[in-house]
Image (cartoon, grey):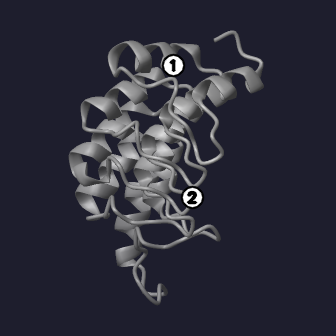
Amino acid sequence: VETLYYIFNNQKRQTHFAEQIRWTIRDSHGNTLLHLAAAYGSLKSLNYLLDHQSADAHVRSYNSFQPIHYAASSGHENCVKLLLTSAPDTINEQTTTLLTPMHLACQNGSLETVKILSSHGGNYKLRDENGLNCLHTACQYSHLDIVQWMVEKLNANVDDFDYMNNTPLHYAAASGSEL
């Protein structure tokens, strides 16, 4: 974060910059500095960008990922918490393929992230572009601890069908898991 702070503050003194460096600059995938800080779990950088650069936690990459999607997909729990504090309405936002932060946490296998998202109103019943809810996803990726927690604590339906009439049980069987 010291490097980020230096660059943002030092560039204001430089006369050869045509325009100020902004948190909104994007890479080839449309990711801003905020997306990358969330993806790599850099809590200090994320906090700096939100507090001192007025970065917008609602910003989307070219595939419609918001910073919370990256933090959730990487299991960066503290980044997820910070982003939910900054932008609580992003909890159930969907990407171009209709993935929510909770779908991505279920893919990654981060039970703690799933719990955090759930406690902030994350809806495990939302479906991606193929009709998979978060229980389908957890079974597809063989994350037994998440499956158990969702069934026991959220009363998730193991007989729920996706758009191809597959249940979470189909995904568990296909993944070869020990669910």
Q: Amino acid at mark 2?
A: Thr
**Residue 177: horizontal and vertical position, in percent?**
72, 16
Identify the residue at horizontal 53%, vertical 50% (top origin): 128
Q: Point out residue 104 in the picture as x, y percentages from the top left corner.
A: 53, 40
Q: Residue 3, image x and y in percent?
A: 46, 52
Name the N-terminal-most of marks 1 and 2: 2
Picture quadrant of residue 62: bottom right
Quarter of the image for the C terminus: give it: top right
What residue do we see at 53% from left, 71% from top?
A: 26
Q: Nearer the viewer, residue 86 or 45?
A: 86
The residue that label 1 is drawn on is 147
In the image, 20: left or right of 27?
A: left
| In the image, residue 13 above or below residue 141 | below
Query: Residue placed at 42% from the left, 21% from the top?
Result: 150
Which residue: 65% across, 21% down?
142
Q: Which mark is residue 75?
A: none
Is 160 left or right of 2, judged from the image as shown? right
Q: Secondary structure at mark 2?
A: loop
Res. 66 image quadrant: bottom left
Q: Nearer the viewer, residue 21 or 85?
A: 85
Distance between the alpha carbons at the discs numbered 1 and 2: 22 Å
Q: Nearer the viewer, residue 6 or 48?
A: 48
Q: Is residue 6 above or below residue 136?
A: below
- The location of residue 159, given as percent across then percent down, is 52, 26
- The amino acid type, in three-letter code, at marker 1 is Val
Q: Which mark is residue 97?
A: 2
Tell me the SS state at disc 1.
Answer: helix
